[in-house]
Image (spheres, grey):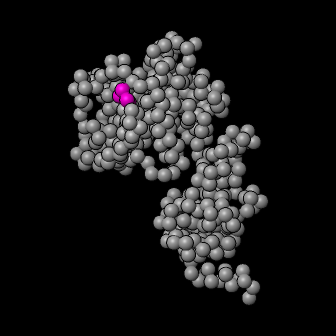
Amino acid sequence: MDPYRRRLREALARITEVEPDAVQLAKMVVIDLREPAELALGLLPGAHTIGLAELGDRIRTVADPDTPLLLYCAVGERSAIAAAALEDQGYANVTSLAGGLKRWMEEGRQIVAADSLSAEQRHRYARHIVLPAVGVTGQQRLLDARVAIVGAGGLGSPAALYLAAAGVGAIGLIDDDVVDLSNLQRQILHTTGAAGRPKPESGAKTLRDLNPEVIVDSHHARLAAENAETLLSGYDVIVDGTDNLATRYLLNDAALRLRIPVIHGSVFRFEGQVSVFLPYAGPCYRCLFPEPPPAELAPNCAQAGVFGVLPGVVGTMQATETIKLILGLGNLLVGRLLTYDALEQDTHVVRFERDPNCPSCGDEAAPPELRDEAEYC
């Protein structure tokens, strides 16, 4: 028996093969081991493409040793050998697709195009595509994503710029304000020439200049109980760039009703905060802050001032969490509040739990009614 057949036979005796009808793609990291020339046939949805020779060096960029892995190749031979090799490296939950892509396709199961990007898109997003944890599949997820940004000011500016640059396909800018010269010390989405124009209109022009492919929906409106669900419906993620507590609580409750994740950010003088709220899968904003502070303890930016670069740092963190959420990467700030002190260049993470008695998310079967809160700040 030749060495390859011996290795294959030994691998098949050791590893776990999974039948196509037992595959749960949403619960696995899927790795296509075929060579580039073979990819024209298509991929399993969500698959990362890593050649067999590269697997040992690149596996840790997409999965840790406890991650459920599904490996596949053309007919299931290379994936069996690779699964045995990963088990030797300490990967405890590795399976090989029985029959490989050939059997998957013969049974009429879904595949996706290996390269759905245009030549221009491949060039624009080349530094994303080369990342094994992103690749063409991840970039396509970004292009298909829809993100609403509530507040096109200090926090919304860097978040919008980085999301548009990353290729998020559709961005909604929601703000009822107009550009003022006093905004420009921190609101980098706008320019001096935009003074007096509605912020969503000004922001949309900037984003289109940065990335003409991005669809930008401008909503020159204040988020209110009567329009919140209409404005936010259809988006995959909401970035909270608001600057007042009344809107923040309303946004929390609307997101729970629509079951849309919220990437929270806030700033005060030299300090900022970031967290992620996944509806009913983690705590919400009211779990963290059940009641607003007294008005004298929550002045707005005009009253308290804000360090100009601080919203840039926090808004960029919000963009980071948004992209991670879309791509399914890393450890999101769910149940964790990251605080940032610009003067000390220090971060601290506070953990908090979902409150079973929370008036907003305590009962999943009874989502909160929307109401316009009194202005707290």
Residue 195 percent location from the top left of the image: 52, 12
- The C terminus lies in which quarter of the figure? top left
Residue 10 percent location from the top left of the image: 62, 83
**Quarter of the figure with residue 305:** top left
Q: Is residue 181 visible?
A: yes
Residue 293 left/right relative to 186? left
Residue 375 percent location from the top left of the image: 29, 22
The answer to which of 359 and 5 lies nearer the viewer is: 5
Query: Against 358, is 209 above or below?
Result: above
Residue depicted at x 22% and y 26%: 294
The answer to which of 136 and 107 lies nearer the viewer is: 136
Residue depicted at x 25% and y 31%: 292
Query: Against 275, is 223 above or below?
Result: above
The answer to which of 83 and 224 lies nearer the viewer is: 83
Q: Is residue 250 visible?
A: no
Magenta residues, as a range?
Answer: 266-270
Q: Main secondary structure of the magenta part?
A: strand
